[in-house]
Amino acid sequence: MKMSKSEHAKIIIEKSISFDGIVASGFFPSIDVLNDFLMYGHDCADQDDLMPKWIPFKLSKTEFEVVLSWWQTLYPDAKVSNLGVKTNNHIDWFVEAYEQ
């Protein structure tokens, strides 16, 4: 049985160095930033290539809501924010989130 995109995204996020680094920030990326991350096919913060690469994909709004809901069950105070970043570039967003 094929895994749903939202389930695939959850697995990627669980293993992601980038997401591990933002837990304390209390923020979660917007759908556009998350899709930019997922379309990249690997975690840029994983400079040692410890995490497997993935086939790039995007989430629909409904799929994003599933992932966000899951994240908020783990981190109830997390909220979606662009953190003042003017683009949907995930690297810029994660840099800003780390600084929070």
Image: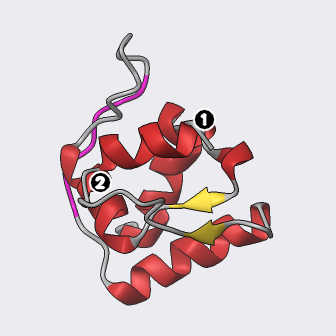
Question: Of 93 and 38, which appears nearest the observer?
Answer: 93
Question: Of 91 and 54, which appears nearest the observer?
Answer: 91
- Residue 70 position, x and y percent, is 65, 71
Determine which of the numbered discs, if any, sits on residue 84 in the image. Answer: none
Q: Is residue 26 left or right of residue 37?
A: right
The image quarter containing residue 45 is top left
Eyeballing the image, is 59 above or below 16?
below
Which segment did they paint magenta? 51-57
Q: Is residue 6 left or right of residue 67?
A: left
Disc 2 marks which amino acid?
Answer: Leu
> Which residue appears at 35% of the width and 56% of the height?
85
- Residue 95 position, x and y percent, is 43, 37
Q: In the rendered image, is residue 1 in sight?
A: no
Determine which of the numbered discs, if any, sits on residue 38 in the image. Answer: 2
Badge 1: how crowded within 10 Å, few (<14), some, or many (20+)? some
Question: Of 15 and 19, which appears nearest the observer?
Answer: 19
Badge 2: how crowded within 10 Å, few (<14), some, or many (20+)? many
> Which residue appears at 56% of the width and 37% of the height?
98
The residue most toward the top is 48
Q: Is residue 14 left or right of residue 41?
A: right
Q: Is residue 20 left or right of residue 3?
A: right
Eyeballing the image, is 44 above or below 15?
above
Query: Which is the main secondary structure of the residues drawn in magenta?
Result: loop
Q: Which residue is mark 1?
A: 21
- N-terminal-most mark, 1 or 2: 1
Disc 1 marks which amino acid?
Answer: Gly
Which of the two discs, 1 and 2, sits closer to the camera?
1
- Regarding mark 2 in the picture, which secondary structure is present there? helix
> Which residue appears at 36% of the width and 86% of the height?
61
54 in magenta:
yes
Quadrant holding the N terminus: bottom left
Colour setting: secondary structure
